[in-house]
Image (tube, rainbow, N blue to C red):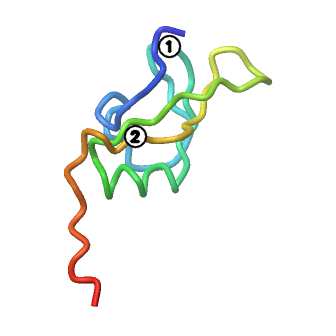
Amino acid sequence: MPVSKVTWRQVGHVTEPGRYMLRFGWVTITPADLAIWEAFPDASFTLLPQVEAADEYRLGSFDLASAPPIELGPSD
């Protein structure tokens, strides 16, 4: 597998959950995946291969390292 992580930009800023064909195979994107990308547009997801089909992936854990820090506000 040539790609191990993907960003929202790499999947074309999709706006609907579904199954999308990319250059390396099919990726299933869930509503929860999209919610993360809407909150953190620079997040990258690890691609998890699906056992039941070759060239089929879903999004796994995500990395916010390139995203700006979150402002939490006062704790009291």
Q: Nearer the viewer, residue 75 or 44?
A: 75
Q: Earlier in the sequence, mark 2 or mark 1?
A: 1
Q: Mark 1 sits on what residue?
A: 24
Q: Position of residue 70 (x, y in %)?
A: 24, 61
- Amino acid found under the numbered disc labelled 2: Asp
Q: Nearer the viewer, mark 2 or mark 1?
A: 2
Distance in Å between CA atoms under marks 2 and 1: 21 Å
- Residue drawn where x is 55% and y is 30% of the image: 27
Q: Mark 2 sits on what residue?
A: 63
The picture quadrant where one finds residue 10 is top left
Secondary structure of residue under mark 2:
strand
State whether residue 55 is above or below residue 40: above
| Neighbourhood count class around disc 2 (C-alpha, 10 Å): few under 14, some 14–19, many 20 upward | some
Q: Position of residue 18 (x, y in %)?
A: 55, 42
Q: Nearer the viewer, residue 3 or 10?
A: 3
Q: Residue furthest front?
A: 76
Q: Residue furthest top?
A: 2
- Amino acid found under the numbered disc labelled 1: Phe
Which quadrant, please, contains the N terminus? top right
- Image-based side of 57 in relation to 4, left or right: right
| Neighbourhood count class around disc 1 (C-alpha, 10 Å): few under 14, some 14–19, many 20 upward | few
Which quadrant, please, contains the C terminus? bottom left
Secondary structure of residue under mark 1:
loop
